[in-house]
Image: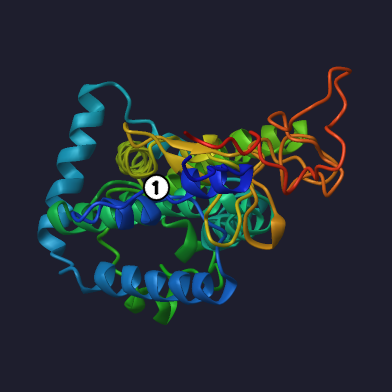
Amino acid sequence: MGEARVTTLEGRHQAAAHPVEDETGQGFLRRLRTPRRPRLRFEILLIAVSYWTYSLVRNAVPEQKSEALRNADWLWDLEQQLNLAFEESVNHAVNSVTWLVIGMNYYYATLHFAVTLGVLVWLYRSHPGRYAATRLVLFSTNAVALAGYYLFPLAPPRLMNGGGFVDTVVVHETWGSMASGDLKNMSNQYAAMPSMHIGWSMWCGLTVFALATVPWARVLGLLYPAGTLVVIVATANHFWLDAVGGLLCLAFGYALATLWYGSGPYALPRVVPEDGGGGVRDKAGRFRSFPGRRGTGGAGVVADGGKGTGSSRGPGIGGPGVVSPRTPKDPDGSPAAGVSARTRAPEEATPRH
């Protein structure tokens, strides 16, 4: 006679949820890369510190005015050789319509921050499982941009010598712009490559387009970066090639987030428990969620954003009355009498001889 061996369903889930960690730290790294619900205070502090650091480093980069002007002349000549030097024509056309150019000046000065923060808040509230990965895209994009400001100082078209561009902010006295009045001394005026107005707006647009369920919101998501491109060119704050630089930085951000999480940011589960215990990673490092697993507070991971209550996906989702697919059943298909769905073992205890 041997000892009776009983395997419970809950024990199986615990074994799957907590794989044996090796001594090389792979377990810790796996936990670090697993999506988890963000915490409000930490996120507010992180965003504030990150933006302060970004602004500090960007403005600490030597302005290198003479080199920035030479680079602007070189870039302008390159666009002319490509027959794509259309910025001056757009700038003069928009400047002739006073109400339009003033509106674009305020668009440039305000939406850059307001829309980006708005999308972050929306992600935090509605897509917490995808928040960290999508935020990583934005932060890594900014990090690459800082390298661009240092390695390739560039004057915007409005500051070129003899370029013929109209500085719309100065001409129309736009209030609050970092390029006018005393505020211009708080920002590096020769850090135009890459354009983070394009990088951030494209990040916002792609995020809204990928995750919004309302058609008009998805359309606005696509229109926002397109409108931003028109604005940065019309106000002579950037060349269109600066926008290309911003897109390349953003592409790096998405590549890094995908490598880190093993999946595209928008393909991750929409909702995860606070402890991030809604899944594991396979041998290739890709995240695999447990739709029916119990997490913190009994909340299950729902990859499609649906609600967990009332579902028969597995334990911890539908409540005490839910029957697991592995629950022993009578010949007629009903649960075995006297066995609870939460405590029933998938196999009867069998003595070993």
Is residue 149 at all visible to an observer of this figure? yes
Q: Amino acid at mark 1?
A: Pro
Packing grade of label 1 (10 A; few <14, some 14-19, many >=20) is few
Nearest the camera: 97 or 206? 206
Does 333 appear above or below 261? above
Q: Residue at x 25, y 58 (%)?
A: 146
Quadrant position of residue 240: top left
Per the image, label 1 sits on a secondary structure element best described as: loop
* Residue 233 x/y as whole percent: 43, 43
Residue at the extreme top of the image, as rendered: 331
Q: Residue at x 74, y 30 (%)?
A: 328
Does 183 appear above or below 5? below
How many numbered marks, from 0 up?
1
Residue at the extreme front of the image, as rendered: 1
Q: Residue at x 47, y 33 (%)?
A: 353
Residue 65 located left or right of residue 195: left
* Residue 132 x/y as whole percent: 48, 54
Does 294 appear above or below 53? above
Q: Which residue is mark 1?
A: 19
Q: Residue at x 72, y 29 (%)?
A: 325
Nearest the camera: 72 or 14? 14
Quadrant position of residue 50: bottom left
Quadrant position of residue 275: bottom right
Residue at the extreme bottom of the image, as rendered: 182
Is residue 92 at all visible to an observer of this figure? no
Residue 95 located left or right of residue 9: left
* Residue 209 x/y as whole percent: 62, 35
* Residue 349 x/y as whole percent: 62, 39
